[in-house]
Amino acid sequence: MEEVLTNPKAGFYINGDVFGAEGDFITSPEVSQMFGEMVGVWAMCLWEQIGQPKRLNLVELGPGRGTLMVDLLRGASKFKSFTESLHVHLVECSPALQKLQPQNLKCMDEDSTNENVEKRTITTLAGTPVSWHAALEQVPSGIPTIIIAHEFYDALPVHQFQRASRGWCEKLVDVTEDSSFRYVLSPQATPATLFLMKRCKWAAAEELEKLGHIEVCPKAMELTNTIAKRIGSDGGGALIIDYGLNGVVSDSLQAIRKHKFVNIFDNPGTADLSAYVDFASVRHSAKEASVNVSVHGPITQSQFLGSLGINFRVEALLQNCTEEQAESLRTGYWRLVGDGEAPFWEGPDDQTPIGMGTRYLAMAIVNKKQGVPVPFQ
């Protein structure tokens, strides 16, 4: 997964824009502006909860086109005390997207007459400085931090194990004589077996007994460890929204090209690879990393957005728009909060919006001193 997605020369995410209707898949921020606005409400609520600090790192992992951050900052721009505290940090590995994000964020270099002061890049959407980093560890520490990880964990590489007569064996990729790919089972224990053992310790015996396959994601465990330690020491919180399960994931690795599922060995590098997020593993990893954090959720995306007031937001937007815009708003709203099968849909069955409301889950990791964040209360 890591090689296919982030290879410096041929990685799927590296050389182009793969998001939106013209790309390979559509994410929640691309569905409707309301998603980014609601995440902005969450961030402002947490900022107030931690005492409205004068300086705050706002970090987004894998920001894509920057759509979520654009909608967040545009919606928050009226709240000057919040935006004036912000320094936005975008963690992005794709050079192509790093070029696109400043355009969408309407960035410009700040004028400075002082030669001793390094020039900053400012987003004119809210007047806040923006910086880019290749990894979370590069984001300066020491001040409260709010981290947003939307559809980021699902792209982290997983290791798959299959139950065999000799025990759990890792599924490895082999090259055949005709240069095609196939799965083979490892003849002995692999380094990833250590993470399998850790994951199994976190699971109940009855949960494991019925499984023939298990996926583990060491990168997710390591990332969560980094996040929890940062939040535990500096204050703030992290919001993780993704599709996944609140338990052991069995066999979920999938490839998507042009909005359709394809074989993962079909021309690697031309399709997105992703896997379900094991939210239970994220929770255990966070608690193991720092005694100073608490973990809340997961709850469904529908519950998360509903508690933040998306119902009121869509009603307000519908008051002043054309019929065409109204239809787009309604469709986007139901894609975000529905399950795709609810009776509200009056159009043709083959055009029923795919509901993200119950397939996507939201989890928060926060500093214990700050209490329970909205809307996990």
Image (cartoon, grey):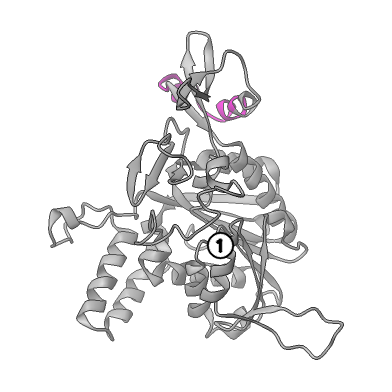
Give the x, y percent position of residue 95. Answer: 60, 60
Residue ranking furthest to the bottom: 113
Q: Write down the quadrant of residue 117 in the picture.
A: bottom right
- Which residue shows up at 47% across the image and 74% down it? 71
Q: Amino acid at mark 1?
A: Ala
Q: Is residue 80 above or below residue 266?
A: below
Looking at this view, is 197 or 118 the one in front?
118
Q: Residue furthest right?
A: 116
Left-right relation of 55 to 37:
right
Work out whether 108 lies above or below 337.
below
**Highlighted magenta segment, given as a residue range:** 196-211
Q: Residue 221 colored magenta?
A: no
Residue extending farthest to the front is: 178
Residue 356, quarter of picture: bottom left
Going 72% across and 54% down the picture, which residue do you hit?
137
Q: Nearer the viewer, residue 348 or 110?
A: 110
Instruction: Give the crowd class for mark 1: few <14, some 14-19, many >=20 residues within 10 Å.
Output: some
x, y percent for residue 153? 53, 47
Residue linked to disc 1: 96
In the image, residue 202 above or below residue 260: above
Q: Nearer the viewer, residue 192 or 281?
A: 192
| Rendering coords of residue 346 (x, y %) | 13, 62
Element marked by disc 1: helix
Residue 149's x, y, as percent? 55, 56
Magenta stretch, overall SS: helix
